[in-house]
Image (spheres, helix red, strand yellow):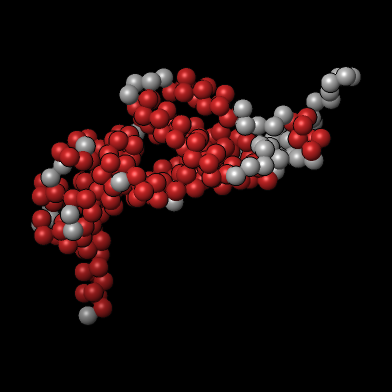
Amino acid sequence: MRLMAVNRAEQRAATRQALLAEGRQRFAADGYHHVVLAEVARAAGVTKGAAYHHFESKAGLFRAVVAEVQRELGERVATEAERYEDLWEQLRAGCRAFLAAGTDPAVRQILLVDAPTVLGWDEWRALDEESSARHLAEALAALAAAGIIADQPVEPLARLLSGAMNEAALWIAGGGDPRAAEQALDRLLAGLRIPDVLQAHAGGVPAREGHAARTPPPGE
């Protein structure tokens, strides 16, 4: 009996994963409004009833796909940031990883184009805040605590940067130059950073470890 229960659980998981994979491919390629749930089920090799059992509706399948893509994007951002020990470089690497995701059809069509309108702004924001937006807020909070950026409320700053990067990712997806977007992002972020010499005077830790703060010339 236990073996049968395990087999049924594995079969349910495999059915769900097949529907997710097929739905993701179609949502990314065709857009939400051109996808038919029955066709997703047929292509995945399962019945339409099984699709409704697992997700209840096309919107339910789309919601699950959005959560999966959003989670993967958050992991991608975190992985790139964690390649660096320096807090400032962590922020830059994470932001660059998010911009680069604009070339991914799943991120572009599913997350940036369809999700805000299909799920509604509040639900889309909630999913975003559980992944990439959360990593951004945590990075900004760490920078403020270290004295690398000004001590300030993190949430409005994170929302402003997140909105700017969403727009930039869409611009890249539409054929914009990724390098130009990265350069613009660096200039935007540089405006937040307190110069190393001021960090040292305030007792903060310069962002580039191992580099002494510049000694100001007389009169500066």
Which residue is rendered at x = 55% and y = 39% of the image? 157
Q: Position of residue 121 (x, y in %)?
A: 34, 44
172 and 145: which one is in front? 145
Direction from residue 151 to residue 28 in the image, left or right: left
Task: Report the residue that reaches farthest toward the right.
Answer: 218
Q: Viewer-proximal residue, 104 or 144? A: 144
Residue 10 position in % (x across, y down): 25, 64
Residue at left offset 22%, top offset 80%: 1
Residue 83 visible to an observer of this rendering: no
Q: Is residue 194 left or right of residue 96?
A: right
Would you place residue 144 above or below residue 219 in this image? below
Q: In the image, residue 191 lies at what x, y percent?
A: 62, 27
Q: Measuring from the top left, give residue 188's x and y in whole percent.
A: 56, 27
Compared across the picture, whether 24 is left or right of 211 comes to: left
Residue drawn at the location 25% of the way across and 61% of the way down? 13
Figure check: 23 above or below 164:
below
Q: Is residue 127 above or below residue 182?
A: below
Quarter occupied by the C terminus: top right
Residue 29 at least partly seen:
yes
| Nearer to me, 45 or 66 | 66
Tally of marks: 0
